[in-house]
């Protein structure tokens, strides 16, 4: 019999009521694969999960610990998702295109991990600000961040990049690795201990699959399965999403997690509205809301026509959407930190008579 503790399960205070605890290792639309003490089972969701659209955070995801009504023949039923100790979510836009009132739902894409590996490659894509943004996301997730600088074999001299990271982020461990040469991989053993779960966060191409493959010791990611009882003997490629490493640690790698790594909205907005952000610096008051304030550079640009109303509205709606997404999920810059900085600045500005020096 398998011990679920090997999968990071911590016995719950809750009355199990004859239900079987398990951990979700794979999710495919409505069907889940769950590791239990009786082995791996397939499971569906109890109907009530579907009743309320705004209950989407309760939707199970890979890494979740759940309670099942076990079925010996056929699918088991997921009755309950146990409280999460950490999670990554992404915003799920619903009714967006259809023109309904816009609702952003939170969709959890990975849960119950201990460590977040933030991967960045030591090549021309190296970008400290991006690492900082991922770090904010990682800290909000509830997991412990670790920075992994990848592809060391491609950098003639990685020391300046390593030093830059260590200097701006002194409280987070940093490791330099190469999945190709094997450099630094032994340092990761500290995080890869039995029962611990790691997730990878980072842009596409930084080497997440390569690292996972070496940690799996060359076992392949895509597993070919023959579906039994299928007369044509069709081959189905299934994508495992929670991997048990030979070390006894687990890695969660889901499509949703990979989409988080692609998300770089803040950077995108600033880059495409530099003209507007340039105007902000010309407003008389540093806390100008660009509504009725005297000396507002935005209002004056709107008046003179050098900034079109359409473009200004575009900027505002993008910002609003961005803030909303940030608020609802663990995306992007920590809004609270940002508000605090803003509040500090406006306090400072008031002290100075509301004027910039
Ligand atoms: P992912 O999109 O983050 O999963 O990145 P992949 O693991 O698919 O890697 C993207 C590309 O980078 C592939 O061509 C890999 O061979 C290459 N790559 C990954 N790790 C290393 C490394 O340590 N050194 C070098 N030179 N290339 C690497
Ligand atoms: Zn203004």
Image: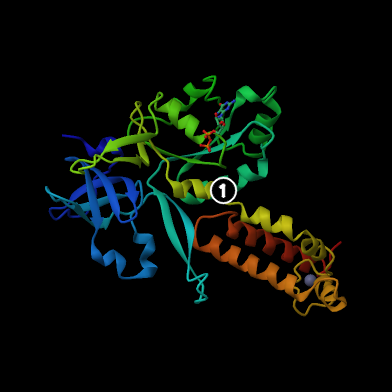
93 left or right of 234?
right
Q: Quadrant of residue 202?
A: top right
Give the image quadrant in which the ligand numbered 2 is located: bottom right
Of all residues shown, which one is farthest toward the front? 232
Colour logic: rainbow
Residue 275 at what x, y percent from top left?
80, 62
Seen from the viewer's position, the closer of residues 294 and 31 is 31
Q: Is mark 1 within 8 Å of ligand 1?
A: no
Q: How many marks?
A: 1
Residue 177 at what x, y percent from top left?
Answer: 55, 26
Q: Is residue 289 visible?
A: no
Q: Is residue 87 visible?
A: yes
Q: Is residue 323 left or right of residue 1?
A: right
Q: Is residue 317 left or right of residue 32?
A: right
- Residue 148 image point, x, y percent: 55, 33
Q: Is residue 132 above or below residue 196?
A: below
Mark 1 crowd level (few <14, some 14–19, many ≥20, 10 Å Cα)? few
Residue found 24% across the figure and 55% down from its top: 44
- Above or below — where is 94 with respect to 238? below
In the shown orientation, is residue 45 left or right of residue 309?
left
Above or below, 337 relative to 239? below
Tag 1 residue: 262
Task: Locate the N terminus and report the quarter of the image it occupies.
Answer: top left
Closest to the observer, 281 or 273: 273
Disc 1, SS: helix
**Residue 120 location, x and y as percent?**
59, 36
The C terminus - image quarter: bottom right
Asked if 198 appears above or below 105 in the picture, the reply is above
- Residue at (20% x, 40% y) in the render: 228
83 or 208, nearer to the observer: 208
């Amino acid at each position: 019999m398998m011990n679920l503790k090997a999968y990071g399960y911590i016995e719950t205070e809750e009355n199990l009521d004859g239900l079987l605890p398990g951990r979700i290792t794979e999710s495919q639309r409505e069907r889940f694969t769950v590791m239990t003490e009786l082995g791996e089972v397939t499971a569906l969701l109890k109907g009530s999960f579907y009743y309320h659209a705004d209950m989407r955070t309760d939707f199970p995801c890979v890494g979740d610990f759940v309670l099942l009504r076990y079925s010996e023949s056929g699918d088991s039923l997921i009755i309950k998702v146990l409280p999460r100790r950490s999670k990554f979510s992404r915003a799920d836009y619903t009714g967006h295109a259809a023109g309904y009132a816009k609702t952003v739902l939170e969709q959890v894409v990975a849960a119950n991990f201990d460590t977040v590996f933030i991967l960045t490659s030591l090549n021309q894509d190296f970008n400290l600000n991006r690492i900082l943004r991922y770090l904010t996301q990682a800290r909000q997730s509830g997991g412990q961040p670790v920075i992994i600088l990848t592809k060391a074999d491609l950098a003639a001299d990685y020391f300046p990049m390593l030093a830059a990271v260590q200097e701006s982020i002194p409280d987070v461990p940093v490791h330099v690795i190469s999945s190709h040469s094997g450099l630094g991989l032994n340092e990761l053993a500290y995080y890869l201990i039995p029962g611990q779960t790691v997730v990878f966060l980072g842009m596409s191409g930084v080497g997440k699959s390569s690292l996972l493959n070496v940690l799996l010791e060359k076992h392949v990611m895509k597993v070919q399965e023959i579906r039994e009882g299928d007369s044509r003997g069709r081959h189905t490629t299934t994508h495992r999403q929670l991997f048990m490493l030979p070390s006894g640690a687990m890695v969660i790698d889901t499509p949703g997690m990979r989409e988080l790594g692609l998300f770089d909205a803040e950077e995108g907005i600033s880059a495409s509205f530099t003209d507007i952000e340039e105007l902000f610096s010309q407003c008389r008051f540093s806390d100008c809301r660009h509504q009725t304030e005297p000396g507002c550079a935005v209002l004056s640009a709107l008046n003179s026509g050098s900034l079109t109303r359409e473009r200004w509205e575009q900027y505002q709606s993008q910002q609003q959407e961005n803030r909303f997404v940030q608020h609802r999920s663990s995306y992007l810059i920590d809004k609270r930190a940002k508000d605090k900085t803003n509040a500090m600045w406006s306090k400072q500005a008031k002290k100075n008579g509301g004027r910039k020096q």
